[in-house]
Amino acid sequence: MRNPFAYLHQLEGLTVNDGIYDFLPHWQKESALHKFIRFIADEILMNDTDGPTRVPFGPDHLHPKWILPVDVAMLKYGIIDEPLFLIPDEPDPSETSASEDDPSHFRDPHYVVNACYHYLLDLRWTQVYEDLMSRITDEVFYVMFLNRRALANLNEFLASYVEEVRRDNFDTDEASLSDLFARDGELKRARPPMWARRAVFYRDRGRCTACGADLSGLIDTLSVGNYDHMMPLARGGLNDVTNLQLLCEDCNSKKSDRVVAPSNRYRRWY
Ligand SMILES: [Zn+2]
């Protein structure tokens, strides 16, 4: 997140061409982290078009069939029972030169790459691919949601794009997005719904993430003020469950609207 242009095929792909608009509506259960994970997973699988990491498949170890990692993933998750696509063999170069004067036998040197690419393009519109994306997203979210520093970095990256949003740039069919803003580059404060407060309360185990004060007796009486936006709204922060952390009143008032790296101290499980 600190070096988005060095990362994979550039994280910019997540936010360019008004991509940031998808992140603006408040308290989406399909959170900013879900969108990020899906983007990365899709990039990794879709960019593997020339089969450099092809995987052997089948009982014949000497002469296996070869499949793409996306099929391996769908098999592992039990989404499909059989591979949907077998990587074809490379054209035989001797065959190409032997039949040079017969164009009908000319073999395309990009034959394998193109076959993989077209498989992946079609696959993207299928329900099995959608199922794979949601399984990967759920699994990675489960792990990453615990790490406040990672979430803060993601939200800081997104905030830099929110800060650039000008309300008069929205088309008429995007007028509802304009209403979400307090002013250019700053979203209105929206009260976190109960599901978001519960998720953050249990993730942070009922304690102030800064000083450790036990707030667990207060779950029903905690005010929304205890749910701090790690990336402040005034700095382009989102109303998103991944942008919240639990703070006691003292720590929250000390923090105010500053950007403070969330604590990277984690309580032991036992
Ligand atoms: Zn505290």
Image: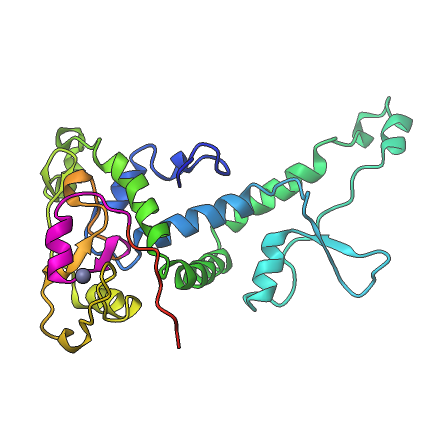
Res. 69 in view: yes
Residue at 67% over, 44% down: 51
Q: Quadrant of the C terminus?
A: bottom left
Residue that lies at the very extreme toward the top in this rendered image: 101
Q: Is residue 49 above or below residue 76?
A: above
Q: Position of residue 163 (x, y in %)?
A: 21, 34
Chosen colour scheme: rainbow
Q: Is residue 192 left or right of residue 148?
A: left
Res. 190 in view: no
Magenta segment boundaries in residue numbering:
242-261
Q: Position of residue 115 (x, y in %)?
A: 66, 41
Q: Position of residue 161 (x, y in %)?
A: 27, 35
Residue at 11% over, 59% down: 250
Residue that lies at the very extreme toward the front in this rendered image: 211
Q: Quadrant of residue 222?
A: bottom left
Q: Is residue 172 above or below residue 139?
A: above
User: Is residue 241 a member of the stretch shown in magenta?
Assistant: no
Q: Quadrant of the N terminus?
A: top left
Q: Is residue 41 left or right of residue 221?
A: right
Q: Quadrant of residue 160?
A: top left
Of 90 and 217, which appears nearest the observer?
217
Q: Give the total number of marks visible in the rendering.
A: 0
Q: Position of residue 261 (x, y in %)?
A: 28, 47
Ligand 1 resides in the quarter of the picture at: bottom left
Of 49 and 92, which appears nearest the observer?
49
Residue at 28% over, 39% down: 20
Q: Is residue 40 above or below residue 251?
A: above
